[in-house]
Image: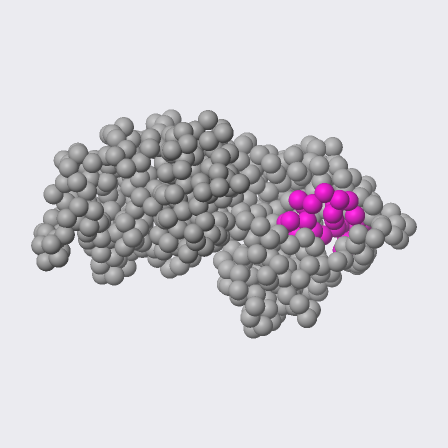
């Protein structure tokens, strides 16, 4: 029975950086070869980055991806790494664009597999870009038949993994660009256990880490045996190469010639070895890591930090700026930024108006001091007075001028000093339009765009508790967490003047936005009918604002953006028909 040392490369690539991504593959393969690995697997579309979106439509980009693969194969051989099998995702073009996986060995591409199942839901548009493959690929390497699959293939009952079982393979490799959402890691393991049983072989599942625009990738790569045992599980958000030694079934002398009509099977082979490898005889035995599960708030915080860090780094920024109001939202965003890029690179600005309370200013200063952030005060009252008096404004128009002066001030600082402006609005506010366009909605990135207000508070408490538990000072002032939320645009203003209690609001929004439930369904669940109709109307009317809001990391099942696409010009109102 062959015993192979498998390597999972949980890496962070950048869309469009083909040379940089290929260099990363070479570097990680060197490490794997030095550790005695026989095979290293990289995530989906590693060479191009994922998702490349409309770059796929450019023939020049497709050609560059294919050339990058050929160059990588030659470079691996030239570096003395030809004996280590490398499985890497890339973009192919055989007359149609393909989401592809290459098996590289001894300087050549031994086999190519084209993704069979193309997701076309939520954030995925793969049928817009790719053509589905119809061939099941098996590569015989070091005495083991290894099947190749990509991401969505693993989510299909009776799909490629059933074919793997009929083909009698010894290992199934599944490479992924699987975006993060809350609790998704809890569904991955049961899924892989079902697929390993279906295939009758271990499943090597490798996922990327990092972020691309609004998508965050959490890793959580693993190796699962046919009996459901976890042989290896990598931690979330940590870029590294992880190893496991595993005994695999030897390839049969006479593999099945037919596995049914579902997919055509193509079989390839690398050069036969003189003897089957036994990893534990050749090198020092290795203890495979099985990372413990991350608690919910820590997992969400990790996603938000990862999303912001990569947006800043991959887009060439070094620092961020944001308005510090002393409230919970700006405090949490500033703390995320400090964790992502260091407090010294966070530039907080207090923008008090004539209605700002004293505690708002002192809480903002306290927050900046705790984070080690730069801090300045720019009073906006004179600028607001100039607008208001020149245009004779009052009421809501006057309130919005305050928010817009703040936004203009932050953008001016950004232009002068090169910082990325962070918007501090949360999902609850964004849902009901409780924001000022060109005001507090201004910015280049919105770290808590997909975080409901109730979760913002929960995250703040968790982050402070985490700091205390590790012997550090809590980053968020307790007063910012405990005081009633207010935009402070008029005397004595509170959010509850305009909105329901956030606990109730978030419960309704979860059903109406995330769950696509109608008004009648939500009312039937026990919510007040008048309140539900009001909230639904606020959500429907705010679509135009959301379209102009900055990108931010997706953490929920349905985020605003690619996940939820409703027309701006739209006369349908759910309450008109009672949800029917």
Say if 95 sits above or below 441 in the image.
below
Residue at 23% x, 40% y is: 487
Count the marks: 0
Residue at 48% x, 52% y is: 565
The reply to whether the magenta stretch includes residue 498 is no
Say if 100 sits above or below 454 in the image.
below
Say if 576 sits above or below 116 in the image.
above
Q: Would you say 544 lies left or right of 512 here?
A: left
Q: Position of residue 321 (x, y in %)?
A: 27, 51
Q: Position of residue 285 (x, y in %)?
A: 67, 38
Say if 106 sits above or below 382 in the image.
below
Residue 345 seen from this side: no
Residue furthest front as drawn: 577
Tell me the quarter of the image containing the N terminus. Answer: top right
Between 510 and 576, the residue placed more toward the observer is 576
Q: On the image, which quarter does residue 273 sit in? A: bottom right
Q: Would you say 271 lies left or right of 417 here?
A: right
Between 187 and 67, the residue placed more toward the observer is 187
| Residue bounds of the magenta highlight | 137-163
Q: On the image, which quarter does residue 103 sit in? A: bottom right
Q: Position of residue 451 (x, y in %)?
A: 40, 40
Between 249 and 84, the residue placed more toward the observer is 249
Q: Position of residue 572 (x, y in %)?
A: 45, 49
Residue at 57% x, 47% y is: 178
Residue 536 seen from this side: yes
């Amino acid at each position: 029975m062959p015993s192979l040392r498998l390597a999972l490369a949980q890496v962070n690539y950048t869309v469009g950086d083909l040379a940089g991504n290929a260099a990363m593959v070479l570097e990680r393969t060197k490490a794997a070869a030095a550790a005695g690995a026989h095979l290293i697997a990289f995530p989906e579309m590693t060479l191009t980055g994922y998702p490349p979106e409309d770059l796929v439509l450019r023939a020049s980009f497709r050609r560059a991806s294919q050339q990058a693969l050929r160059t990588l194969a030659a470079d691996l051989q030239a570096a003395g790494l030809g004996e280590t099998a490398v499985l890497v995702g890339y973009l192919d073009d055989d007359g149609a664009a393909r989401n592809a996986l290459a098996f590289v060995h001894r300087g050549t591409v031994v086999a190519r597999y084209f993704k069979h199942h193309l997701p076309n839901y939520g954030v995925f548009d793969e049928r817009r870009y790719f053509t589905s493959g119809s061939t099941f690929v098996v590569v015989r390497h070091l005495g083991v038949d290894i099947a190749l699959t990509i991401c969505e293939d693993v989510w299909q009952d009776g799909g490629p993994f059933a074919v793997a079982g009929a083909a009698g393979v010894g290992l199934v490799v599944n490479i992924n660009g699987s975006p993060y959402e809350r609790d998704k890691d809890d569904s991955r393991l049961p899924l892989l256990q079902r697929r390993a049983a279906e295939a009758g072989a271990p499943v090597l599942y490798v996922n990327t880490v990092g972020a691309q625009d609004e998508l965050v990738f959490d890793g959580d790569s693993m190796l699962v045996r046919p009996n459901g045992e976890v042989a290896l599980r990598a931690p979330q958000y940590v870029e590294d190469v992880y190893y496991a030694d595993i005994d695999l079934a030897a390839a049969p002398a006479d593999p099945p010639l037919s596995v049914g009509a579902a997919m055509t099977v193509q079989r390839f082979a690398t050069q036969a070895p003189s003897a089957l490898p036994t990893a534990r005889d050749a090198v020092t035995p290795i203890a495979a890591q099985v990372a413990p599960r991350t608690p919910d708030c820590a997992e969400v915080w990790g996603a938000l930090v990862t999303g912001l860090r990569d947006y800043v780094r991959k887009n060439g920024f070094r620092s961020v700026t944001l308005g510090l109001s002393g409230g919970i939202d700006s405090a949490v965003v500033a703390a995320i930024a400090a964790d992502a890029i260091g407090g010294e690179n966070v530039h907080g600005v207090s923008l008090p108006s004539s209605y700002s309370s004293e505690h708002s200013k002192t809480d903002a200063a306290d927050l900046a001091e705790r984070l080690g952030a730069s801090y300045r005060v720019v009073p906006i009252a004179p600028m607001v007075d100039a607008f208001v008096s020149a245009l004779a404004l009052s009421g809501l128009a006057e309130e919005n001028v305050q928010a817009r002066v703040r936004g203009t001030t932050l953008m001016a600082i950004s232009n002068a000093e090169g910082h990325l402006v962070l918007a501090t609005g949360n999902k609850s506010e964004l849902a009901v339009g409780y924001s000022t366009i060109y005001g507090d909605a201004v910015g280049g990135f919105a770290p808590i765009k997909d975080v409901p207000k109730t979760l913002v508070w929960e995250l703040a408490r968790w982050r402070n508790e985490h700091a205390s538990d590790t012997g550090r000072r809590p980053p968020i002032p307790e007063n910012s967490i405990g005081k009633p939320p207010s935009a402070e645009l008029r005397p004595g203003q509170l959010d509850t003047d305009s909105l329901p209690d956030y606990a109730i609001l978030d419960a309704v929004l979860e059903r109406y936005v995330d769950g696509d439930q109608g008004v009648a369904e939500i009312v039937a669940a026990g919510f007040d009918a008048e309140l539900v109709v009001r909230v639904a109307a606020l959500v429907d009317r705010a679509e135009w604002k959301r379209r102009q809001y900055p990108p931010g990391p997706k953490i929920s099942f349905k985020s605003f953006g690619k996940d939820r696409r409703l027309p701006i010009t739209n006369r349908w109102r759910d309450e008109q028909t009672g949800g029917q």
